[in-house]
Amino acid sequence: MGPTVYTGTRRRRPVPDTDPPATTVADAAAAVPTSDATQSSDAVDPTSTEATQSSADRSTRIPSGSVAFGDLTRAAYCPRQLYYARREPDRSIPDAQRSRIDLAFRYPELVTADDAALSDRPIDPSPTVYRERLRTLRDGGCRERFGVPWRSLANPDRTRAFLVGRSCHGIAHKVLSGDEAVVTQSGDHEVGSSVDDAGDADAGDPPIPCLVSPGTPPERGVWEPQTVRAVAIAKALAWEREREIPRVLVEYPAVGVVREVSLTVRTTAAYRRALRTARGIDGPPPRVSDDRCPPCEYRDRCGTETRSLRSRLGL
Ligand code: SF4
């Protein structure tokens, strides 16, 4: 059985994930040294707002038994993959993926860029389609769909924020001020007043964390491993702010798409399953042997036969 997609109200089996796991699963994976065996795998970009904090400081803040966001993501994809990943000496993300993530921090520039400039960027659609998608978000789409002003998404309050929760820790690529988004009684989002600092934001509506993926989204919703990561980010931010964080935006900047993950009974249960799985691994878990395996970076080491191979052999 392959990874499940959460569409917000129901789950369905996705089309096969064409992204390699490194893009769909370990999209922020890089080493953040920790003092215990949880081995954080969440990126600290040298240009990030909070990357200057020493790893020693981070280690002392991370509670024993806390699991890195990246490990939860892999646990949700395939526990055996997490087992292999934890044994990697270097878990930093490839430059190509980092370049795609960085697009999420250049929206104001990209939305007005010409074809030649966009052709030099690691985007998947044509420049025309990409620019149109960003313009749709800028010209009301972001506000209408997510209750978030474009300026908030394009110029977030915090970037690459290192979050430490009670049970998990890692990087939230952005944290948007919640006071710019107001939920009406009808459930629609409207734009409210802006605040400039996190302290004031805590007094109003909850902040909105963002997960940035270098990959591509499913047809609808968000891949289950990314849903788990999004919930983990919300939990950690909730612990930091001592308030509920009800939703997370998931950005796919290489294709100009934004999705939302809400914390529901179902998505929170998926997070808790991944947390139990990640904590419980003490030897190689069973192979999943399904459509998660062909794009897996550990398939050779794992020795899993893929369906295509079996079918080619007529088995
Ligand atoms: S090849 Fe399949 S079973 Fe093996 S680690 Fe990868 S996803 Fe898991």
Image (cartoon, rainbow, N blue to C red):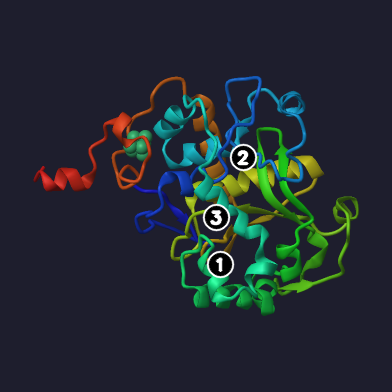
Q: Quadrant of residue 79?
A: top left
Numbered disc 2: secondary structure: loop
Q: Reply above or below: 254 against 4.
A: below
Numbered disc 1: secondary structure: loop
Q: Which residue is mark 2?
A: 43
Q: Are marks 2 and 1 in contact (CB under 8 Å)?
A: no
Where's ligand 1: which quadrant? top left
Question: The residue under label 2 is which amino acid type?
Answer: Ala
Q: Reply above or below: 273 against 210.
A: above
Marking on residue 256: 1
Is residue 146 visible to the viewer in this orientation of the structure?
A: no
Marking on residue 100: 3
Q: Position of residue 313 (x, y in %)?
A: 10, 43
Q: Are marks 3 and 1 in contact (CB under 8 Å)?
A: no
User: Label 1: few (<14), some or many (≥20) within 10 Å?
Assistant: many
Q: CA distance from mark 3 to mark 1?
A: 11 Å
Question: The residue under label 1 is which amino acid type?
Answer: Gly
Question: The residue under label 3 is which amino acid type?
Answer: Arg
Numbered disc 3: secondary structure: helix
Return the disc, 3 or 1, that comes first in the chain's sequence: 3
The residue that appears at 16% across and 43% down in the rendered structure is: 310
Q: Position of residue 225 (x, y in %)?
A: 49, 46
Return the disc, 2 or 1, that comes first in the chain's sequence: 2
Horizontally, residue 36 falls left or right of residue 181, namely left
Q: CA distance from mark 2 to mark 1?
A: 22 Å
